Amino acid sequence: MESKNLSPSTFIGVKGNEIISFGSGQPDLPPPKQVYEILPTYRDFKYGLIQGQLNLRQSLAEQYPQSTVDSFVITNGASEALDLTLRALANKEGKNKILLPRPYYYSYPFMVKFSGMEPVYTNLIEGRIDFDDFQEKVQGCKAVIINSPSNPTGRVESIKTLKQIEKITDDLGVYILSDEVYKDLIYERENYLIKGSHVVTINSFSKTFAMCGFRVGYLWSLDQELVNKIIEIKTHTSMNTNILGQEMAFEATKVPRDFIDNQIKIWKQRRDMIYEGLVNLGLDLWKPEGAFYVFPEIKDPRNFVWNMFKQHKVITYLGEWFGADNRVRFSYALDTEKIEEGLKRVEKYLKD
Amino acid sequence: MESKNLSPSTFIGVKGNEIISFGSGQPDLPPPKQVYEILPTYRDFKYGLIQGQLNLRQSLAEQYPQSTVDSFVITNGASEALDLTLRALANKEGKNKILLPRPYYYSYPFMVKFSGMEPVYTNLIEGRIDFDDFQEKVQGCKAVIINSPSNPTGRVESIKTLKQIEKITDDLGVYILSDEVYKDLIYERENYLIKGSHVVTINSFSKTFAMCGFRVGYLWSLDQELVNKIIEIKTHTSMNTNILGQEMAFEATKVPRDFIDNQIKIWKQRRDMIYEGLVNLGLDLWKPEGAFYVFPEIKDPRNFVWNMFKQHKVITYLGEWFGADNRVRFSYALDTEKIEEGLKRVEKYLKD
């Protein structure tokens, strides 16, 4: 059966006017014009600092507490930031396990294994961390990856839980890798920045500023020894991040907060439409509090994803890629007309 | 003693009119204007294919024999191409050792270790591979890294040696990682492309087209299983290479051969000047046949590098970073006036 071979790459490059894609997790909106206004006169093609351009790190240091330009490394997207951090941790003495709340972003288990370490899991309850289970599992780990707001659940952890996690990991000497790439896309409250000398925060310009293809991310940590190890690895494995991308990211740091507030209004409208639409179709799902994903339970998800694509030209992602066999992920990074049309097709499929 | 802490990063970001830098290995000449003429109207910010943009891979497929677009992966510079290949090889069953001709490009041993494998060495004789020793050492290895033209030696291996290496590694089932980033900077003959289903060729737009900071490299291999493994690793660890960089690289593939021929004339003039200059100062060095480095023997290299920098404002790189304790590397990627001035300062130092 063809559908056995489903993977995210099944859908890569699939285009067509009639296709509705709830697949890929990237904003459909354009970046703020400030980021590309520098293009016409740009003329610097030489190697940059491995750690990242100084102007960009200076601008970031103003956003993060207790920071200097030394606290940051600019990377090829959040992906490389996480990968480098895991590789640096794998180099350190000690435990070999990394705790992942499940469902998880689908690259996490791969990255952990590629770094030579072992993923272990704590299952979310209603899309949120179960602190009792977390507390037990974290004991045997070198680090934990926290991703709030979460891809694929759309959930935001409570500040209480995040503070409990901050404390217990600090007490145990366990690192937190806090993947906060959706920090500017929260509908309910401001982001809570997880802090401590045992924290590595991962972020990106891809989602907030809609420049995914430029691959500019960064990490922030007050553990200078770890940061230095990360720079050492990057020196030999990829050198500086694309310098024009960094210059565009620097421009993005100067974009007024209005831009983000306006984006959130748009995302919230879409969120409401898809959430209510799927609830009305009788599906069981969590209301997204951040990011741009819904993650409903679906009967026979493989048939759903395959047939929605083949018969109805709607792309969705299998929950099993994210560690949830009974769910399907919908990204709602598309305009409301398309969301509406997509919902109609889902309705048609479910009725048949 | 301060000079004990010398490393390439000692010199990063060091600028000043009076400084002559024989340090960093990047072209001082600008890229061909075709690569940046596309900037003003560029407007694509979305994720690209992990393997690389189709137009660029199509263009490369026309340059390499027996190839299709599937034979290439576009990477964050040659560095990431090598790193991904080593990580993919580390994932394969079998031996754990990687053979490196010494002196070597200074990142090779680090990359091999970061991938969890072990570097072993075959010493060059007069800057060239000693095939007898190579033949013996390669038996216990999973792969060998060949770098011809070589950084730091400036040497080009004979076609006879390259063919011997092609054959013995094929017979033994050992991979060749052929780092050919200087393939267009050979003074003596055309580049010889190492071939075979056991070969991964690493290349880059950095040196030929003077766009180091954009970090666009690639790998080519006819081992489709290995290429697919590399794409899988890149999917999770960095995703697509900066898409604007790839578009610029595509423009570079259309630049007429004249551009390269003119560059070689300039490099050859510089090569002759620095080679003859250092010979006239009584230094023992190999005549560069490719790339843009000379690698003379120097008495007490640490004092030389330190004092040339502190007293004479001339940057050079310690041979020990490249596995040669008794040498110093000079990059001659600077104009002839500066080379002349630099030589005068070296003369002054050596006389004192």
Image (cartoon, coloured by chain):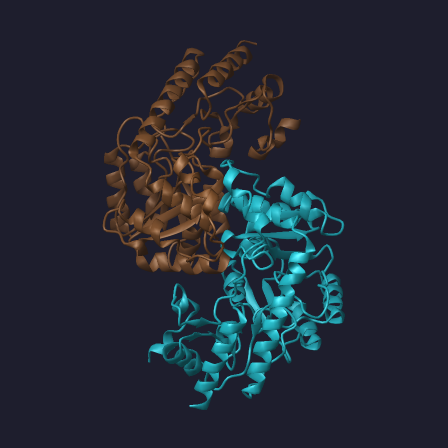
Chain colours: A cyan, B brown
Q: Position of residue A238 (x, y in %)?
A: 49, 46
Question: On the picture, is A215 further left or further right than A173?
Answer: left
Q: Can residue A142 be seen in the rendering of this structure?
A: no
Q: Nearer the viewer, residue A192 or B306?
A: A192
Q: Nearer the viewer, residue A306 or A40?
A: A40
Give me the residue at 59% from left, 43% from top: A52
Give me the residue at 46% from left, 32% from top: B26
Q: Is residue B269 above or below residue A117?
A: above
Q: Nearer the viewer, residue A280 or B258?
A: A280
Question: On the picture, is A297 further left or further right than B179?
Answer: right
Q: Is residue B303 above or below residue B199?
A: above
Which quarter of the rendered picture does the N terminus of chain A lie within? bottom left
Q: Quadrant of residue B250?
A: top left
Question: On the picture, is A232 further left or further right than B253?
Answer: right
Residue closest to the far bottom: A352
Q: Quadrant of residue B155?
A: top left
Q: Can residue A136 be seen in the rendering of this structure?
A: yes
Q: Is residue B331 above or below residue B58?
A: above
Q: Nearer the viewer, residue A122 or A21?
A: A21
